[in-house]
Image (cartoon, rainbow, N blue to C red):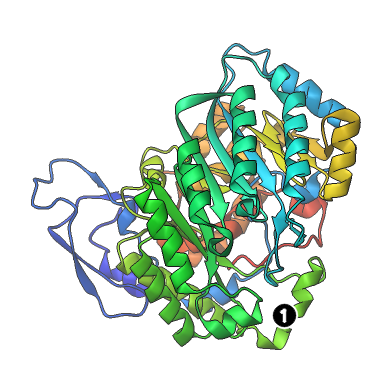
Amino acid sequence: MRALGRHISSYPDFGIAGVLPCALEVRYGFQKPRRIACPCRGRSHDKRIPMPDMIVPCVDLDLLCKYDTAGPRYTSYPTAPQFTSSFTAADFREEIRAANAVKEAPPLSLYFHLPFCESVCFFCGCNVTFTSDRKRPRPYTDLLIREMDSVAPMVAPHRRVAQLHWGGGTPTFFPPAELKRLHDATRERFSFAADAEVGLEVDPRETTSEHLRTLQELGFNRLSMGIQDFDPAVQKAVNRIQTEEITRRVIEEARERGFQSVSVDLIYGLPLQTERSFAATLERIVALNPDRVAVFNLAYLPEVMRHQKAIKADTLPPPRTKLALLRLAIERFTAAGYRYIGMDHFAKPDDELCRAQDDGALYRNFQGYTTHAGCDLHAFGASAISQVRRVYAQNCKNVREYEAMIQSQGLASHRGIRLSDDDVLRREIIMRLMCDFALDPDAIGRRFGIEFSSYFAEALEMLIPMETDGLIRRDNEKIVVTPVGRLLIRNICMPFDAWLKKKPGQKFSRTV
């Protein structure tokens, strides 16, 4: 980290914006410095050129070990453990009606949770129902349609769907005809924007050419898939055998059918992973050339997710090896031309995520980083979490309980939370840090009518060691997250999380 800081000391805004020379010499981690072309491509430097795609954090393993603690991923604030059963389906109905009484209500984002999987992946942290019964999708689709029938009449007709996503589970566990029925029912009940982002998660092992043809005909334009690791020993250890050939077939056919974006997920910290084996996986991923890559830290919580007990703790890579795997991923993907968005996400420089980040429009919700800020999110299915204005509402997790609630009252919300003014303030701060990697305390103070330095005196005190360690810096009173700080953005957000003190001892994954 220090070497990188010295290397670019003559360009004080490196990583935010800078006046560039016609070539830059950049150090990737502990590699030798590399000369890379300047984005100007020979044009005159008559203005400041944004250069977040040049951010390449130098990964100091000692520093990562220092900050390797448990903490929220902040796909919401307050986070899901703060939801309570005192918030009911009736409360959610009231909020939906109130949100749609506003003339300038924002666009909609729709999420559908399709929870079924043929087999258990031992690493999985999702809400999944493991079954080989291929008859289960049809009655479950009936429930989703019934839930939509309860929500759609409360939604103002002028509101358009800007984003639709199917997650799981394995959406392609559903046969193509059932996916078409769900999609058609959704289109009949909601109005879609002409340029809506329509995506889903697929399992290459469960995805046929008929699936992809049907999805193309329905207008899906994005898909994501889990890969985790291509090493056969690692795949066997986590009970997910997925060859490169199967994966490549789905990616290539999706591109042939005109899907605009293909994303893949990897996990570091899996049993039997080594630096050598993971480096080989990274090379194969780069060759597949996905548009986006997420490299997640294994959330190993066997006391919470019982199926993870199949993973023996002594087969997991030790902490320093695990962090070295993260370093390998960062170095390989940035060297291959991907922009490091932050935390665990990478994207090609021309991807919408990068453009949104450049424009200050990046957002974060339960699907991770997204380009659709400000939408009300209506989520359907077991365990799905909706976000409407100041309210989060989560459906019951068990499919049988979800079925009973839908049949009895049309909605399955069994817990949630209504945000206080303080929650809204802290949510905005965490959102800006997670997405912009910068915070303007004066602007926050003016917007919310507070004196920032006194209101957050304790949080600012907690940030001092992080500034000393180079995770953040001060720039004209603004708090700016440095390239290496993006790796530890969860840690940087945690001082602003009031709920961590209210409810100590909560179970969270490791921050790196």
Nearer-the-camera pick, 470 or 45? 45
What residue lies at 71% left-to-right and 67% top-to-bottom?
119
- Residue 460 seen in the figure: yes
Q: From the viewer's side, name the closer residue of 306 and 467.
A: 306
x then y, percent, for residue 76 = 66, 45
Residue identified by numbered label 1: 311
Residue at the spot x=35%, y=51% of the render? 256
Q: Is residue 287 depicted above or below 311 in this figure?
A: above
For image coordinates 70% across by 63% down, the residue present is 118
Q: Measuring 52% from the left and 86% from the top, which residue is drawn there? A: 274
Which quadrant of the figure has residue 375? top right
> Viewer-proximal residue, 480 or 71?
71
Where is residue 224? Give x, y as percent.
Answer: 51, 54
Q: In this view, does 54 lie to the left or right of 279?
A: left
| Residue type for callout 1 | Ile
Q: In this view, does 277 lie to the left or right of 302?
A: left
Q: Position of residue 478 (x, y in %)?
A: 45, 44
Q: Is residue 145 placed above or below 19 in the rendered structure? A: above
- Quadrant position of residue 347: bottom left
Q: How crowded is mark 1: few (under 14 residues within 10 Å), some or many (20 or more)?
A: some
